[in-house]
Every structure is written in structure tokens, then in C-alpha cells.
Amino acid sequence: MGHYDDLEPIGLSGIQTYELASRPSKVTVADFASASAADDTLSEFLGKLPNILAVQSLRSLASDMRRARALGKPIIWGIGGHVVKTGLAPIIIDLMERGFVTAVAANGSVLVHDTEIAMVGFTSEDVDASLGKGDFGAARETGEILNCASRRAADERIGLGEAMGREVSSCSPANAGSSLLCEAYRRKLPFTAHLTIGADIGHFHPSADGAALGAASHTDFRLFSTLVKGMNGGGVYINYGSAVVMPEIFLKAVTVVRNLGNDLKDITTANFDFIQAYRPLKNVVRRPTANGAGRGYSIIGHHELTMPLLAAQLIAGQE
């Protein structure tokens, strides 16, 4: 290229245009939102949302979940601890009752927070305040319940999730009705727990037994793989708020199922979180559904907003 003195602005007179009416477009006024009214029913409110992007995904996912329920296929919710900490257990429990949650798969933090909610009605300590004193995660009861359950699970060759549900329920906790562990155990609904040893507070308590924790969690991985196997032909897996552990667990379970010669097609997966992280997008939404094996959805937003919307879409659609 020459110097500025040698440059001339390009001429645009030869640009070819087309008639606007001839162009296919992604958005029309028919897709726009309508203003809500104070006396709208739930169905009316949902019907007034814009039929664009995340709302379309939410509606399609809810349709797939209703289909899975009708077919008797698993609807598995993989969750992280933030789901409990944002007060959403009552919504998941209600969806259990309605048949839209047939199994729960949780990382280790869910066990901690859900146990504390069941036992004392509060959770989520101030890490900044307690870490400097060395008190972070040192609540005695929480660690003892987790570690006692893991030893019993290893001895009885059952999964850690089931053992935790039984252990917490046996304490007749005041808030059992708000506990995913207790409510799943009461319904005999599968609840699998997937640990990263050293990541949860109970793992550094004196009562911790690494072998027991590992054995119980490994049993749950095998049980989870059986649940994933059942997804073939219409099942659903939702990853809610776990950026690393549950997406990795799900991907490995998919591998196990297919490695053993089983079909895993016509499945639906979805990831909900307030950021779009690498592992959920790849390991939940895209890779397991690739090559025509299913449909994947990614919906970004805070759990305390998106989960009530999903539940409302499911409930309104069945009325």
C-alpha cells in the first residue's frame, strides 16, 4: 500500500442491492413480546414472552421433558451446590412430584448445603471471615454426617447419595421437606453423589475415610451410568450450575454406555448457568448430541430466575 497521499476512498456506486421484502429474516413482529397484565394467568404470562432465542430454547426443552415423561424415560437433573444456596430445592421437589425429575445427580457441595438446610435451616458460611481463622468448613455435624454415610455406604455397597438420604432422614431433621436428599430418599428416587476428594469440607474432618468416600461415589457413578443408558429414545439430562464435575461425569457416563455397545440416541441435554463455561457447553450440550444423536440447549441466566421460568413452562404446559 502507498502513503496516505496515494489513497482514494473506494467508490460505492456499483454496490448491488435487493428488495427488503425478498430477504428471509430471523425476527418478525409476530415474535415480539406482549405487555403483561396484573391479572394474567401463568399460561398467559408465558405466552406473552418473546418467541426468540432463550425463550424458544426454554419452550423446546419443556416440550422434550413432557415427551420424556410420557415415554417413561429418565429426566435427570445434574446439579451444583449453588442450586441449593439460591433456594431452589422446593421447585425441584415439586417437579419430582409432577414427574419432571426422575433422578438427581449432585456434586459434593450439594451434600454439604442440603444437609445443613435439612438439619438447621441455614447454610453457606462467610468464607472470607472464617478462612483466616482456619474455621472454614469445620462444622462438626456436617462432616460427621457425610463421613458416617460414606462408611456405611461402602460397607453395604450402596451409593453415597442413597446413604446420605438415609442418614439425614434418620435424624428426623426439622426441614426435611426442603431437603433434596430427604425428599428423594422418601420417594425412593435415585440420587447419586459424585465427589472430588478434597474439594468438600467433610473431606478434611477427622472422621473422613478416603477409601469409603471413593468407593461410595464410584458406586454412584455406575448407577448414574445406568440412568444415562435409559435415556436412549427420548430421555433428558439437565446440567444446572455445575461448571466442571457434573459435565465431566456425564461425558464419562455417555462413554461407558456407548462403549458397552448400547445405543444412546434421541436424547435431550441442557445446560443452565450464569456464564457459558467450556465443559458444560462441550460435554453436555454438544458432544453427547453430535451427529444426530439428540438436541442440546444452553440457557444463560441466574438460577433463581431461570429455574422458576422452566418450572412454570412445564406446569403451564400440562394444565
Image: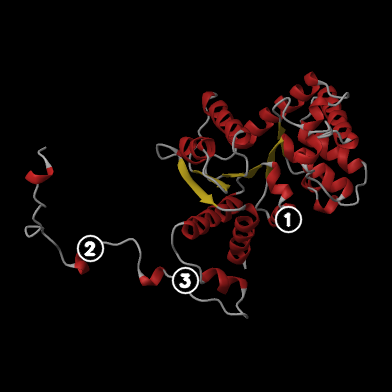
Q: Where is residue 229 in the image (x, y as percent from the top left)?
A: 59, 34
> What's the residue type where badge 3 is placed?
Ala
Q: Position of residue 68 (x, y in %)?
A: 57, 50
Q: Which of 200 and 314 is in front in this view?
A: 200
Q: In which quarter of the image is the N terminus?
A: top left
**Element class at badge 2:** loop
Counting residues from the start of the chain, the first of labels 3 and 1 encountered is 3
Disc sitting over residue 97 in the figure: 1
Q: Label 1: how many residues lie within 10 Å, few (<14), some (14-19) or many (20+)?
A: few
Mark 2 vs mark 1, foreground winner is 2
Q: Distance between the residues labelled 3 and 2?
A: 23 Å
Q: Distance between the residues labelled 2 and 1?
A: 47 Å
**Element class at badge 1:** helix
Q: Which of 1 and 303 is in front in this view?
A: 1
Q: Where is residue 50 in the image (x, y as percent from the top left)?
A: 46, 67
Return the residue at label 3. 33
> What's the residue type where badge 2 is placed?
Arg
The quarter of the picture where residue 318 lies is: bottom right
At horizontal 85% and vertical 28% (from top left) the residue drawn is 147
Mark 3 vs mark 1, foreground winner is 3
> What's the residue type where badge 1 is placed?
Glu
Q: In which quarter of the image is the C terminus?
A: bottom right
At horizontal 58% and vertical 71% (from top left) the residue drawn is 43
Query: As displayed, is residue 38 above or below residue 279?
Result: below
**Element class at badge 3:** loop
At horizontal 33% and vertical 61% (from top left) the residue drawn is 26
Counting residues from the start of the chain, the first of labels 2 and 1 encountered is 2
Q: For the view shown, which residue lies furthest in the right direction?
A: 171
Return the residue at label 2. 23
The quarter of the picture where residue 211 lies is: top right
